[in-house]
Image (spheres, rainbow, N blue to C red):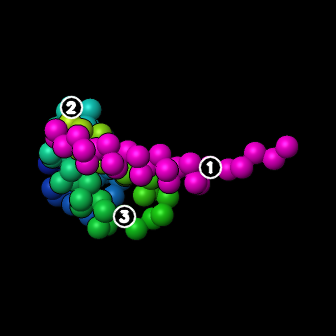
Amino acid sequence: MLRIVAHEHSRDIDLLRMLAYALISERQGHEALAVLDRLDTLDDQPSSRLPLMLLRSHALRQAGRMAEAQSTFKRYVSLRASRAPIKQQ
């Protein structure tokens, strides 16, 4: 159902994000990567970069592209750690 709606509303970022989640949950990594590629071009919000990177690492793993998946996940962890708030003592 989401595929049909996403086809009709191919520029709806929230809908595409839901479709990517759904495809990953259904282990459709190749399809999820295509949706994530679209999101990369449409979603220019800095706050979206990390979540999309994590989704991409999962999709790459499901697509059997393990080296890319590991590299993407390591980059995600590194960027996430650099953006973590510093606890004050």
Q: Amino acid at mark 3?
A: Asp
Task: Please tell me which of labels 1 and 3 falls first in the chain.
Answer: 3
Q: CA distance from mark 1 to mark 3?
A: 22 Å
Q: CA distance from mark 1 to mark 2?
A: 31 Å
Q: Which residue is mark 3?
A: 43
Residue 84 marker: 1
Q: Residue at x 31, y 62 (%)?
A: 40
Task: Please tell me which of labels 2 and 3 falls first in the chain.
Answer: 2
Could you say which is closer to the camera, residue 36 or residue 15?
A: 36
- Tell me if residue 24 comes above or below residue 56 in the rendering: above
Q: Residue furthest right?
A: 89
Q: Residue at x 26, y 54 (%)?
A: 36
Q: Is 60 in the magenta?
A: no
| Mark whose residue sits in front, 1 or 3 | 1
Q: Secondary structure at mark 3?
A: loop
Principal secondary structure, stretch drawn in magenta:
helix
Q: Secondary structure at mark 1?
A: loop
Q: Residue at x 49, y 58 (%)?
A: 47
Quarter of the image holding residue 34? bottom left
Q: Position of residue 2 (x, y in %)?
A: 21, 44
Image quarter where the N terminus lies is top left
Could you say which is closer to the camera, residue 49 or residue 13?
A: 49
Q: Position of residue 20 (x, y in %)?
A: 27, 45
Q: Amino acid at mark 1?
A: Ala
Q: Which residue is mark 2?
A: 26
Quarter of the image holding residue 25? top left
Image quarter where the C terminus lies is top right
On the question of residue 54 being in view, the answer is no
Magenta highlight range: 63-89
Label 2 neighbour load within 10 Å: few <14, some 14-19, many 20+: few
Q: Amino acid at mark 2?
A: Glu
